Image: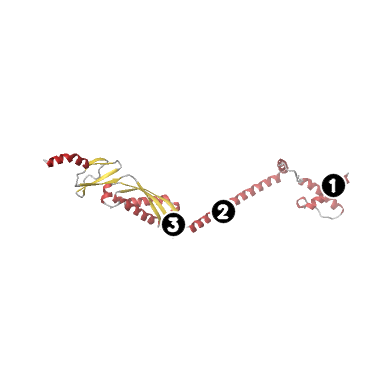
Amino acid sequence: MVSVFFTVLTFPISVWMCIKIIKEYERAIIFRLGRILKGGARGPGLFFVLPCTDSFIKVDMRTISFDIPPQEILTKDSVTINVDGVVYYRVQNATLAVANITNADSATRLLAQTTLRNVLGTKSLSEILSDREEIAHSMQVTLDEATDDWGIKVERVEIKDVKLPVQLQRAMAAEAEAAREARAKVIAAEGEMNASRALKEASMVITESPAALQLRYLQTLTTIAAEKNSTIVFPLPINILQGLLERINKRRTGGRVGRTLQAATCTESDIYKIWDEAVELKCQDH
C-alpha cells in the first residue's frame, strides 16, 4: 500500500523528468543501454526518454565559424610567409558527428590548419597573392571531403591575411616603384614624340602659307597684351628685317667687298648695326 502511494505521488515528477524539449536548431541523439536508438536524431520539439536506461546528447546544427591561427608556411619558391584564414562549417549528420569522432569541432580546427599548410606549400608567392579565391575553394573541397565521415559540412573557407617578411615587402615596393617610373617615362616619351610630330606638321603648314605665320604673330601679340605686363617687347618681323638687309648688302657690295648679312644668322650686335645703317640710309634718301 505504501509503495502504491509512493508511486502515485512520484508519477508526475517521473513523467516530467522523462519529457525533453530541444530547440529548432538542435538535434538529440538518444542512447538506450549504450546503443543509439533506431531512427536517428530526434527533434526539434518534444521527445521522451526512459529514466535510468536512456541518455541523450544535444548537437547544435547551426553554422559555426572559427579562425585559423597564423601559420608559418614555406611556399613553392622558398619564401616564408604567415597566413591565417577563417572556416565556416555546420553539422550535417548529428549521428555521425557523435558516433564517429570524439570532438568534431576540435578535429575540424586542426584539420583546417594542416590543410592550409599543405595547399599553400604547393603554390608560389605570386599565385598565393593573385589566386586567393581559387586556393580558398581548393581548401574548402579538401576539408569537406575529409570531414564527410564525421557528419560535417564545410561551407566556406576564406584566406584573411598574407604577411610577408619586411625585407621582401621593401623589395616588392622598390620593384613596383621602378615599374611605375618606367611606365611614366614611356608615356612622357610618347607625348614628346606626338608633340614633335604636331610641331613638324604645324611648321610645314606655316612654311607653305606666309599668311599663317602672320596670323600666329598677331595671336602672340594678343596673348602678350592680355597678360597686363608693364613692359611689352614687340618682336621685329623677319620680312621687314630681310628688306633692310637687302638694301644694306647692296650698299656694301656696290662700292667694296664686305660681309653680307642674312636674317637667319644675325646676332644681337648685327641687328643694332643693321638698324643704325637703316637709319643712315633713310637720312640719305631724304
Q: Which of marks 3 and 2 is nearer the N terminus?
A: 3
Q: Given the image, on which type of amino acid does mark 1 rest? A: Val
Task: Give the left or right position of residue 81, taking residue 99 as reference.
Answer: right
Q: Where is residue 76 in the image (x, y as percent from the top left)?
A: 42, 59
Whole-angstrom CA distance, mark 3 to mark 1, is: 85 Å
Q: Given the image, on which type of amino acid does mark 3 rest? A: Ile
Q: How many labels does the image show?
A: 3
Dot 3 corresponds to which residue? 81
Q: Nearer the viewer, mark 2 or mark 1?
A: 2
Whole-angstrom CA distance, mark 2 to mark 1, is: 58 Å
Q: Residues within 10 Å of mark 2 (few under 14, many from 20)?
A: few
Task: Give the left or right position of residue 160, taking residue 14 as reference.
Answer: right
* Residue drawn where x is 22% and y is 42% of the image: 17
Q: Position of residue 61 (x, y in %)?
A: 31, 45
To which quarter of the image does residue 257 belong? bottom right
The outermost residue toward the bottom is 78
Instruction: Point out the image quarter for the C terminus.
Output: top right
Q: CB under 8 Å between callouts 2 and 1?
A: no
Q: Residues within 10 Å of mark 3 (few under 14, many from 20)?
A: some
